[in-house]
Image (tube, helix red, strand yellow):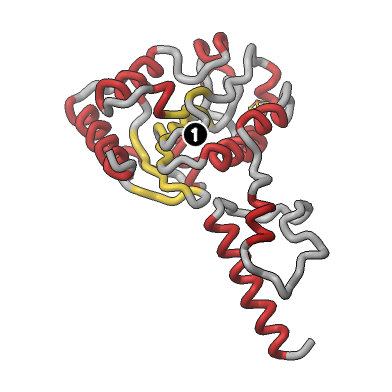
Amino acid sequence: MQIPDRTRLLRELKNQLLFLKDAGYSEIPIESELFPENISTSNTTPINIVENSQKIKTLTQVRDELGDCTRCKLSNGRKNIVFGSGNPNADLVFVGEGPGADEDEQGLPFVGRAGKKLTEIIEKGMNLNREKDTYICNIVKCRPPGNRDPEKEEIEACNPFLLQQLKAIQPKVVVALGKPAASTLLGRTVPITKERGTWHDYAGFKLMLTLHPAYLLRAYTIENRKAVHSDMKMVLKELGQ
Ligand code: SF4
């Protein structure tokens, strides 16, 4: 290969990778058709990639792919898969850790006491409508027995579906609710009381960390309520509201 060809190809490859990053990709599945063999190296304008980026699945397609999932052992004890609920085009997505007993029973996220608190935060605190303005889901879609924390293999099995959900929704802001969700999304142990109220990046999405509503109910102090209020004010500002 001539040196100029190599330089040009590397430059074009870099441009394509940057374009994919902007389109929300954080990894390249090598078996996918993102780089079909017959892609023209002389026409590397984003047009080819735009066509391919449209292959990002819709929420319905992601749900269909999940199916009656048995990818991890949480399937053994669940009553219902809790995929998520809300507006598939929401600017704001809340991500919790996993379904509890009420959620497992109803197949819907955040419907128990903590869910009611989250609704209050969204509707009274932020003046938004839970169903119309947000989408709510969890890191794992099946209830861990006894509400224990999800295990590493369970998170690894389920996390690709969360990522696909976010890519389908393309929210402006993702909010991680509580330490397990924040730690999973950031890939490290997050001291949530210290790091809440700070912005991060998750797969190209703006990520805010805040306290879990269940924790807020357990430790219903003025300090914690003010902290969540302040975090949500930052979210609203980012959303332009
Ligand atoms: Fe499948 Fe996720 Fe449920 Fe595990 S938690 S069985 S990966 S849907």
In the picture, measured across the screen, residue 27 lies left or right of residue 112, that is: right
The answer to whether any part of residue 216 appears in the image is: no
Q: Spot the residue most to the right.
A: 38
> Looking at the image, in which quadrant does ligand 1 appear?
top right
The answer to whether any part of residue 167 appears in the image is: yes
The C terminus, quarter of image? top left
Find residue 132 and report its horizontal and vertical position in percent: 42, 24
Find residue 159 and report its horizontal and vertical position in percent: 60, 38
**For mark 1, does the 10 Å Cα neighbourhood hold few (<14), some (14 to 19), or many (20 or more) residues?**
some
Q: Which residue is mark 1?
A: 89
Amino acid under disc 1: Asn
Which quadrant would residue 155 be assigned to in this image?
top right
Tell me what residue is drawn at x 47 percent, y 35 percent.
Answer: 181
Number of labels in the image equals: 1
Find residue 151 and report its horizontal and vertical position in percent: 59, 33
Tell me what residue is drawn at x 41 percent, y 35 percent.
Answer: 92
Tell me what residue is drawn at x 56 percent, y 9 percent.
Answer: 105
Between 228 and 52, the one nearer to me in the picture: 52
Find residue 100 and report its horizontal and vertical position in percent: 51, 17
The N terminus, quarter of image? bottom right
Which quadrant would residue 36 be assigned to in this image?
bottom right
